[in-house]
Image: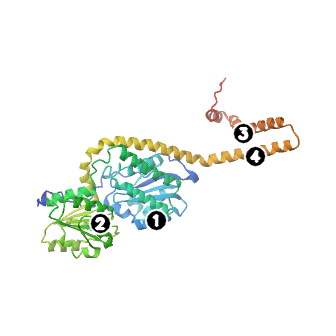
Amino acid sequence: MQSPCHIPRARAVGSGCYNRLPRADIRDRETPLTLSDGMVLFTFGINHRTAPLTVREQLAFHAGELRQALRDLTGGGNVQEAAILSTCNRIELYCQAGEPRAVVGWLAQNRRVPLRELEPYLYTHPEREAVRHAFRVASGLDSMVLGEPQILGQMKEAARAAREAGALGTMLEQLFQQSFSVAKDVRSGTAIGASVVSMAAASVRLAERVFGSVAEQNVLFIGAGEMIGLCVTHFAARHPKRIVIANRSVDRGRKMAEKYGGTAIRLDDAARRFAEFDIVVSCTASQLPIIGLGLVERAIRARRHRPIFMVDLAVPRDVEREVARLDDVFLYTVDDLGEIVQSGQTSRQSAVSEAEAIVDRRVDDFLQWLRTRASVPLIRVLRDNAERVRQGEMEHALKLLSRGEPPEAVLEQLSHRLTNKYLHGPTQALSQSEGERGEARALLTKLFNLHHNPD
């Protein structure tokens, strides 16, 4: 076993390393496009770049909370559509709402975090930047691990939860569907996903720096979700001495363990057997830590101070933060692993510009659709008005024909009356004051494709 003194200790969470972060400006950086009923499209939130784990875990939403939270958010009338993306690295809200500031206040109140404490870490993106942000997130361009594919599945889950809560309307549905399409184009059209260094791979790499080899170690996985599945796959490739999966549902844990020659135990039994394991990887959906300081201290004594390597991938954390202070424990969180995976991303940097070009092109396409959709109510009113005029003139013409008027004269009169009524508004606009007349002249020239001689 290599000497642990050469291993960088996991950073103490909340150590103040984020104090140098500039205050995020939560005001819109551009005038957003106003949609129907005065609603605007925007997204806001925090991620691994703007907020430490201590803040992210306070805002994290459990999967079982999302639907009710979305119903509460959209039930007041200010928010027409909404979706919440909550992962270990980010908590973001995608909204169509009348007052963005009110939604920020809702998040602070819902998570019971004072707004003044939350604001320094927040970012907000109106309209174009909101669309671009969604596309970049889905494509893995905004991830801690550049190009990682897991975020796409998490976005799909966020959209599904919003849909089931009745919070996903036409606009956000289209935004998410286009995000998924962009992610597919980026992954198939660039090398952004080549040789992805994942959190799971980084966990194995760190474990090997502590023990030299994983082959002689007993590994305990707590949880049976997607992230744990990825970790089991990577550790199993190193052929550890024993793989055990602890989960509330033993059947689910057993199905995962059997794929790799491991065994499954009840989550309640993990505490009793904790001292048996050299490596512990945990990622559950618990809202409170499930591995306490006392438990780990007892395990260390029982192991006669042989080191334990621990990886906590959960947000909120599964392991009490005080555990990191123990001399014989090497505890790493998602933020710690983020520093490790950065070194494996150099080979993918050349693909970033290609991916960004795809994103920018698709953003323009989406905004064109959005602006067209924003004009739909006006177009509908315009067409309804034209239809009323047409019907009125048609009835007038039929009455003339019923009285025996010559058809040619009736058609001539119908065409003149329609022309005069349709041109009455534009003609009136040209009769306004000098400044307004210039604007009307330019607009009408464009609308009717006119080429007039100003003389």
Q: Secondary structure at mark 2?
A: helix
User: Of the residues shown, which amino acid type is indicated by label 1?
Assistant: Arg
- Residue 418 location in percent, x, y? 75, 39
Q: Earlier in the sequence, mark 2 or mark 1?
A: 1
Q: Calculate the distance from the C-alpha at mark 3 to the C-alpha at mark 2.
A: 71 Å
CA separation in Å, label 2 and label 4: 69 Å
Give the label on residue 422, or none.
3
CA gap between label 3 and label 4 equals 13 Å
Mark 3 vs 2: CB contact within 8 A: no
Q: Nearer the viewer, residue 122 or 192?
A: 192
Q: Quadrant of residue 362?
A: top left
Residue 300 vertical placement versus 430 (above, below): below
107 or 246: nearer the viewer: 246
* Quadrant of the drawing holding the N terminus: bottom left
Tell which circle, 3 or 1, labels the residue nearer the N-terminal end.
Answer: 1
Crowding near the residue tagged with mark 3, few <14, some 14–19, many ≥20 C-alpha atoms within 10 Å: some
Q: Quadrant of residue 311?
A: bottom left
Give the residue at the far top of this rendering: 455
- 435 vs 70, left or right, is right
For this view, does 79 lie left or right of residue 194?
A: right
Q: CA distance from mark 1 to mark 4?
A: 48 Å
Name the residue beneath numbered marker 4. Answer: 391
Q: Is residue 349 visible?
A: yes
Horizontal and vertical percent position of residue 276: 18, 72
Q: Position of residue 330 (x, y in %)?
A: 19, 63
**Residue under pointer 1:** 67
* SS type, badge 4: helix
Mark 2 or 4 closer to N-term?
2
The amino acid at mark 4 is Gln
Residue 120 visible in the picture: no
Mark 2, other Cα within 10 Å: few <14 / some 14–19 / many ≥20: many
